[in-house]
Structure formats: C-alpha cells, structure tokens
Amino acid sequence: MAIDRGKYRRMFIEEAREGLRALGNHLVELEKLEVLPADGTRPTGHASAAQEAMDAAFRVAHSLKGMGAAMGYTAFAELAHRLEDLADIARQGRSIGSEGYDLLLEGSDRLEELVERVAAGHEDMELGELPGRVQALVARLRAQDASTVVPTEGASLPRVPPPPPAGQPGLLTVRVRIADDASLPQVRAFMVHKALGALAGWRETFPAPEALRTRELPDRTLTLRFDPELADRDAVERMARAAQGVAEVTFGDVEAPPPAPEDAPAAPAERAEADRTVRVRTALLDEFIDSVGELLLARSRMRALAGRVDVPELFDLVDEVDRLTRDLHARVVAARMTPLSFLTERFPRVVRDLARQARRSVDFTMSGMDIELDRAILDELSAPFLHMLRNAIDHGHEGDDVRRERGKAPTMKLAMRASRDRDNVLLELEDDGAGLDPARLRRRAVERGLIGQAAADALNDTQAVELICLPGFSTAEAVTQTSGRGVGMDVVKATLERLGGVLRISSVHGRSTRIGLELPLTVAIIQVLVVEAGAPGSGMRDAYAIPINRVEQAIDVDAAAISSARGRPWAKIGAELVPLHDLSGELGYPAPGPRGGTVLLVGRGADTTALRVDAIVGQEEVVAKPLGPPLSELAYLAGATLLADGRAAFILDPLRLVRAEVVRG
C-alpha cells in the first residue's frame, strides 16, 4: 500500500532534521566519553552515561530508518539501517573506535543531504560506497573477539528479545508503543494500523481506528490481534518497526481486552496538552506580530483621543481594549519564543569538526540553552555564533603542545552560557586560551591600513580589544578554510546592532577571552521612552524613541552639578562624575553649552553616560520598522516608529549616538 508522500513530506523533513541534529550530538558526546583520561581511569557514572547516549543514538537511527521506509525513500532507509547496525554494536558495550564514529557522523551528514534534497523537491540520491564501508566495518567488528567490551562499574544485563507466546490457543497479540518524544501519537498509531491491517491474519485493532481521530491513545500503545496460523510474525514485526515514531514492538497471547477509553483514567493534563501541538510557519507568526503591533498602535491613539473628551464609558472601553490587546500581544509573542537549543543543538558537532580540522583538543560545554528568545532573533544568530566558535578554536587555542609548554591542560575549555538579565538575554562564549594582546591588535590594525598609527597609540587596552570588530581585521598570518580573510567579528557586531543588542568583549592576555552578547527578548514590539529634542527658543520639538532597556535611570540634574574636565562636560550623579551629552546637540540642533535639566543614565559600568533631553513625553509600546539607505547607515538609528499622538519618531541607540561623529548644523 503506497503512502501519499506529499501529505507527509513536511512532517518527514522536520522530524528527520530534528532526529539528525540529535544523532550528531549523541555521537559527539559518545566520542568524547570513549577517550580515556590521562590516568586511564573512568569517572563514576561514565559507563551509564555512555550507555544512555548510545541507546539514544540507536533509537534515533532506528526511527530514521522507519521514517525513510514508510515514506518510500529507499536510499535513506538503507543508509539509516547500516548506521543502526553499527550503533547496535556500540550499544552492546563494544568499542567501534574513531573509524566507527567517523562513519556514523559521515552517514549522518549524508542523510542530512538526502533530507535537504527532499525539501528541495528532489527524490533520493545515490549513496556511493558509504553503505558498503559501514557494512564492512560492521562485519569486521562482529568477527572480532568480544574482549573489546568497554569496562563498566558493574556487569550489565544482557539484552534479551521479547519472549515468544506461551503457546496456548488464541489470537497472537502485538503491542506497538509510540515513542514518548514522537508528536501526533494518534496519527502515527493509525499509520501502524494501516500497514499491519493489510497483512494476512489480521483480526482487530484496539483502540478502533475510527476512535483514534477523537480519543487519546492509552499509554501511547496500539494493540493488534492476528490469527497465529495465518500471520507472518517476522513480517508483522518488520512492518511495525518500519513505521514512524515506533519505540517498541512486543508479542503475546490473547488476554482480557483493555478497558474502554471511557473507563480509563484521564491522562495527565500536561501530557494531553503536550500532544495537542501544531507546527506553524514562521512567516505566519511574523504576520501575526505585525498585526498585533498595529493593534497596539491603534489602542494607544484611541487612549490619546479619549483623553480629550470627558466620557467615562469611553475610558472604560479603552481600558478593556487595552487589557485584551496586551493579552493578545503576550500570547503572540509567546508563540514566537523558541528555546536557544533550537539554534545551539548542532554546535557540539560544529566544534568537534573544527577542532579535528585544526588538530586541537577542545572541551565544549553549554548551559542555559532552555532560555527562550524570539524566533526572529534566533534566525539571525547562526552566522555570528559560528564566527565566534571558529575564532575561539583558530585564534584562541594555542595548540595542544604549546598549552603543555605554558603549564596548561592540552585541552582548551570552551563554554557557552545563557542567562536572563531583566528583559534581556545574555549569551557568553568564554575560553581559557591565549587571550587577546592589545599591542598586537594595534599593530595589526595599522598594518592592514584600518587605522593610523596616532589613532592606534591613543587607544587604551579596552578600546584596542574592540579592534577585532573592524571589517577586514584579522590576526591570522595565512588564509585558511576558516580564518584569515578579515570577516568574522564585524559580522557579529553588525548583527547585534541590527537586533538592538550590545557586544561586550573582555580578555586577559595569555589566560582567557569572554565575548558577551546582550539581546532583547523580542525585536518586533518594544517598550520605548519617548523624549523630545530641538533648538532652544524655536517652539518646535521633535520626538525620539529610546528603548527602555537602554535606560538605567531618569533624574533631574542642577546646573551647579555640571563641571568641565578634559575639554568635556561632566555631571555629578551621586558620588560619581559621569560624562554629560546633550541630545539636541548630538542630533545637530543648535544648542547652548552644558545646562541642567532632565537626564537619562544610559549604559552600565564604564559605559555609563548622562544624556540630557528637553522633555520626557512618556512610555509606549511601539512597532519598530527598519530604515532604508542612507539612514540605515547611521549606526545610532535603530529604526523608526509611529507614536500614539500620530508623530513619526526615530528609534535611537543612545550609546552609539554619543560615540558617533554627528555633523552639527
């Protein structure tokens, strides 16, 4: 019975991609676990961790094989079957060596190529000699003496196949359990029924196929019964295991039928809720967020208009619309939020490949990857993170031998961490490698003609470290496949600026480097502080929007608290002197000298700056719209928006504004 590929192609592509990413990560972890420490001993729990990872890898390979077979992609299913055989050897506790892991990873890459061909509208591709190479290694390993079993803390139980039927008369019972992590269990169970129900000897299926459309699948298990004299047990098992999402197939004799769904205890709310999920195109979510943004703008304008008339019922209606709009906004934003793991789950494989290519040892760890970000932001972060990982391995890693000579462990520790900071997410990549040498960075920037010698000499060490973000900057002596072309951190910086984030770099020469990316949770609808600036005495002021997450505090400063030092004004805030800038003057309006008034404290730590504004209008939720050239070339303009009073306003990045060389009128 042929399956309608078009109907299930999208599901196959998405689930195969997820499975292949998981398979790659399991294999990288297993490869690391197989390497013996220097003292030859294995830490407690090593064997159980390795067994768990290999079991997971085997299950993924098995599921991929079943998915490919069910869809009729024979080349995909064949290669997945060969990889499953190889993984099964390691699953039994035997070492497959670096050759085995290389073949598993190469096979995973080839399967990924097949999936992308399917996504592009093509069918299977030729696999060449890869399945034969895997099969040859499997045959060689099976012929070897079983003395290569990996040591464990305790003897593990042998894997025993399900017991055969007891032999008493009755129907042959087959139970097919759908995997816990498989979506749409009822649909998968129905596909199992369609496949097995066409075999000789089939008698009944429970739950009934028509019930699967409206009811839960008890214990995620489908029960089928066959006439033992007509059924081909091997064929039944083979067809069942070939179906998508099947975790286990067991056999037994007839027994009392399971309780009806009406009498079964209710499934936990969490599981039922988790099953009721659908996949939504990101483009549709983008349209939703744009519509909600326009609705927020209409709500703000309605509130502003309601303030001009004395109609209590209108105010009540505005409050109700405000509540409903905020609730809708929160739900739409939540639908766009995606865990960081969606982006980072392939990074262990990337680091492994980069490290092997550079012939360097790297211990890569990740934490906090369950934190969620707007999907639109995640889609932009792939290239920046890849550049950061390449830089860490190419430039940060001194080389195993050099690290030994310097008294370090030969394996460089590379850690990626994520944490929440109010309405922002902080992503950090830190290594214990060579660090950045400010003197060398100044010299290389001058050699490449990026800055002059006088400008380089005027930079302090913190500023010199930021030279790595200049377009065309590189410390590599020769161009390689991964570095030397001067394209890297400038991409990271440009992407962060476009997303409204902040890049922070700190380094200790010879010891470590830390790169921090501070990002907003979402970029579609943002909270801003609306301020005004303009020429004094003109009577006309223009409105500007500053993201709330850029403002630390708004305070009034007396003229007596302002002083001049080193040719620039400073404001005394508490016990500290903070550089003072006038928003009107920075934007090119004619402005007098330093003056008191309302100032915004922006930035943190050494970056703290006081920005004087003519007036604060209020706080609003706005829809950020991108700017086209030539305005988009101004780094301090983060976009534009329409305010509640109908005025258009630029969205400013205050720190970049005070650092920019603005032409004053």
Image (cartoon, rainbow, N blue to C red):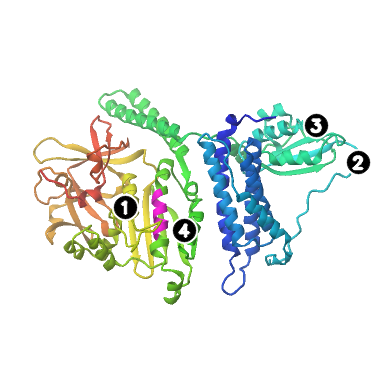
* Quadrant housing residue 621: top left
Mark nearer the viewer, 4 or 3: 4
Please name the amino acid that badge 3 sits on: Trp
Q: Is residue 63 visible?
A: no
Q: Is residue 643 above or below residue 447?
A: above
Residue to which mark 1 is pinned: 490
Is 452 covered by the magenta stretch? Answer: no
Q: CA distance from mark 4 to mark 2?
A: 60 Å
Numbered disc in front, either 1 or 4: 4
Q: Amino acid at mark 4?
A: Leu
Disc 3 + disc 1, Cβ < 8 Å: no
Few, some or many residues within 10 Å of mark 1 (<14, 14–19, 20+) = some
Q: Of the residues tagged 4 and 2, which is closer to the observer?
A: 4
Residue 386 included in the magenta stretch of the image = yes
In primary-sequence order, the first of circles 2 and 1 is: 2
Please state which amino acid type lies under the numbered disc 2: Gln
- The CA distance from mark 1 to mark 4 is 21 Å
> Is the magenta region chiefly helix, strand or loop?
helix
Q: Is residue 498 above or below residue 351?
A: above
What label does residue 202 carry, if any?
3
Viewer-proximal residue among 317 and 541: 541
Q: What is the secondary structure assignment of the residue under circle 3?
A: strand
Residue at image mark 2: 168
Q: CA distance from mark 3 to mark 2?
A: 18 Å
**Mark 4 highlights which residue?**
354
Look at the image and give the residue range highlighted in magenta.
Answer: 383-391
Measure how far apart labels 4 and 3 are at the Cα level: 53 Å
Could you tell me which secondary element the residue under label 4 belongs to?
helix
On the question of residue 432 being in view, the answer is: yes
Q: Residue at x 22, y 39 (%)?
A: 630
Compute the Cα span from label 2 to label 1: 74 Å
